[in-house]
Image: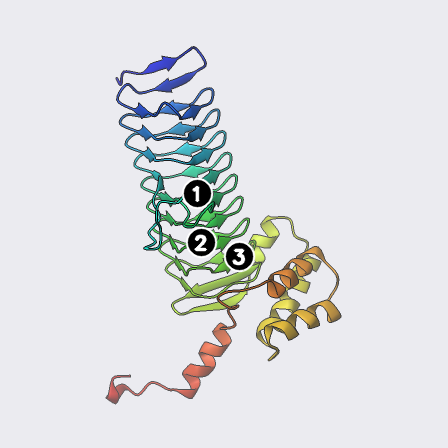
Amino acid sequence: MFSLAERDGDGTIIHPTATIHRTASLGKNVKIGAYTVIGPEVRIGDETEIGPHSLIARWTTIGQGNQIHQGVCIGAPPQDVKYKGERGEIIIGDKNIIREFVTIHLPSGKEGKTTIGDENFIMVHAHVPHNCRIGNQVVVGGYVGLAGYAEISDQVIIGGLAGIHQYVRIGRLTMVGAQSKIVQDVPPFMLVEGNPSQVRGINSIGLQRRGVSNAAIAEIKKAFKLIYESGHNISQAAKEIKKRLKPLPELEEIVRFLEEESKRGISKKTALEKEAEELLIPEIPELGI
């Protein structure tokens, strides 16, 4: 049995081998595992559990009811050669599950933020780097590597071993296939996979599971065709969606995404284009291609 020490009768339990900085603040019914280190200016909300051999280094606020498993590192300096120790903040919401050996880094730049919302599931060895923003109810698969400033909207699913390029935005309820390489923004409600990645269609099953009506899904399919199969550029597609399709909240969300500033551009590569390229460039076995 491990030896545990209860603090002041408020239900918080700290293993005697854990180290808690004097400026750290712990809520009620918090559990801190063996050899875990809680650094300066860390705030941990009620009912949060932190497993053994974890590090919450500094300048981090963690909400209520989170499960943080063993070997997690939160609040280490960013992997950015420009970083000079300037103060930033990590903010993690409520009811997240953060599995073994996940890393979540401090932001780069003065008063920057790395933020994670509520009810997310971040699986083993995933990396959330500086200045990232993850919304709510997101699933990040094992060994996923996000890059700095990536923005992951609510209810996105990212398959294991996928890589997300710096500054890329992933729209709400998009599903990213395992081992994909995402180098440009992906609009809401899409299915994207591959290396190089292609947008395969819309995330119909995910939309149904979230209670989106069949009528709305049909309109989202039309929006997909206007973006990816009409020959329009992104701004033209946004105008056509507003002009030709029903004024549904989901379509308004797609249009907002298309019209917002994009540092990486919006992915226009589709599986249909890949198939066309393969027809134009046939395999030549005798040349090894």
* Residue 95 x %, y %: 49, 34
| Residue at mark 1 to residue at mark 2: CA–CA distance | 26 Å
Q: Are marks 1 and 2 in contact (CB under 8 Å)?
A: no
User: What residue sits 44% from the left and 40% below the top?
Assistant: 90
Crowd tier of the residue under label 2, counting other residues whose Cα lies within 10 Å: few below 14, some 14–19, many 20 or above: many
Q: Earlier in the sequence, mark 1 or mark 2?
A: 1
* Residue 239 x %, y %: 69, 71
Q: Quadrant of residue 281?
A: bottom left
**As drawn, 138 above or below 215:** above
What residue sits right under mark 3 in the picture? Answer: 174
Residue type of the residue flagged with mark 1: Gly
The local secondary structure at tag 2 comes to: strand
- Between disc 1 and disc 3, the foreground one is 1
Depth check, front residue: 131 or 218: 131
Residue type of the residue flagged with mark 2: Ile
What residue sits right under mark 2 in the picture? Answer: 158
| Residue at mark 3 to residue at mark 2: CA–CA distance | 8 Å
**As drawn, 173 above or below 2:** below
* Residue 120 x %, y %: 48, 42
Q: Earlier in the sequence, mark 3 or mark 2?
A: 2
What residue sits right under mark 1 in the picture? Answer: 88
Crowd tier of the residue under label 3, counting other residues whose Cα lies within 10 Å: few below 14, some 14–19, many 20 or above: many
Depth check, front residue: 20 or 64: 20
- Between disc 1 and disc 2, the foreground one is 1
